[in-house]
Image (tube, grey):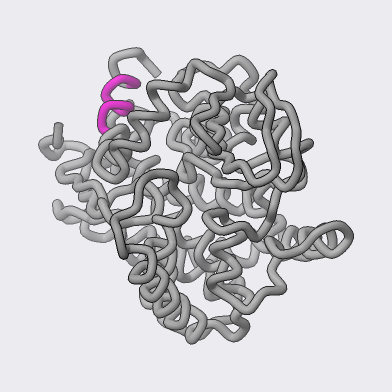
Amino acid sequence: MTAPSARAARRRDRRVYLRSHPALFALLAATRRRPVLRIGRTVLVHGPDAYREVLTRVPLDRTAAGTTGGAAAGLTDGGLLFDQDGAGHRTARRRLAADLNSTAVARLRPLWQDALAARLGPLDHGGTLDLVPLAAELAGLTTAALTGSTADPLTLAGAAAEAAAATARDHLPGPRRPGSSAAASTAASEAAGRLTALLPDSLDAMLAVAAVNTTVAALPRAAAWCADAGLWHRLTPAAAPELASELLRLTAASPILPRVAAAGATVAGCPIARGDRLVLVARHAAESHRDAPADPAAAAQAVFGAGPHACPGAGLARALLADFLLALAPHRPVVVRARPDRRSALPGWAELHVAKGDAPRCG
């Protein structure tokens, strides 16, 4: 990847952060050179080593308000992976990992490939294609297959996106408007009800939210990066898995992980007290702002967490992105229209229209 093409890809991708949560990401960018920084009772964790230390050595409150576990508890009646500790947590993780392993990829791959083959037709006939609803359909198909839901894939994906957006405000640090908490809580509860009504087991709600929102954020952003950086020629069946992993690192679909400390600790010389809010900046731990990270393997893993808090769906995410990009590559798509999503839980595109490679580009 040449420096100019990488800069063009970064410049476009940065828009999804600046339009969705500009104040938060300006703060994170301004403080990223500090491995750990305390601001009141909130601790920002940027450094790769500090990030891994928090996830592997610091006791974390799995169900505290404003964390992923807290959101999970709000979506269901409990009993989730996020609610558990000790042996129960390890057993649940092993069960979920088995559901998302290579056997699951082999079972789900035909669903992805059939959907891609059916939807890429406009590129063959001089038309344009919005990759955001395509990513939502793939996410809905995957989630339905994993949970046993019979809901329409786009309906299921829409409900999961709505539930995530309704709870996102509680995940992110920052001021709240007076009276907004009660309204946000009601909206989140109603959105959770609409999602769980589509699932055979309400305990799968958080799996649906995670699978849909990361997929809808990651796939279009990776495609835009390929278009802007001129990477389509590198996509072969042999090279696609490695390139997909690198694009997931560069785009960091879940850029921050909100957590709460369950006990005191010291990380990178910074004392952490029980109840402190921890903002783990996965984007910086993965060195997404660099073309060449110091430790490529650790950086690629950082976007999926670490240790007992690592995402068990990492392999599935990489396989889906690789297949998505391989299906697009013969068309050498260029971006002709892009609009950031200001409402989504994760930074992403509301629209990303592409056309076959000889179409005029969108700057």
Closer to us: 61 or 236 = 61
Is residue 8 covered in magenta? Answer: yes
x, y (%) of residue 285? 57, 28
Residue lying at 21% horizontally and 44% vertically, measured from the top left: 356
Is residue 261 toward the left or the right of residue 115 in the image?
right
Residue lying at 47% horizontally and 27% vertically, measured from the top left: 288
Is residue 20 toward the left or the right of residue 152 in the image?
left
Is residue 62 covered in magenta? Answer: no
Closer to us: 266 or 119 = 266
Is residue 245 visible from the viewing direction of this image?
no
In the rendered view, would you say 184 is above or below 361? below
Residue lying at 32% horizontally and 27% vertically, measured from the top left: 10
Q: Magenta stretch mostly in which secondary structure? A: helix
x, y (%) of residue 201? 62, 83
In the rendered image, the quadrant that contains the N terminus is top left
Residue range (magenta): 6-12
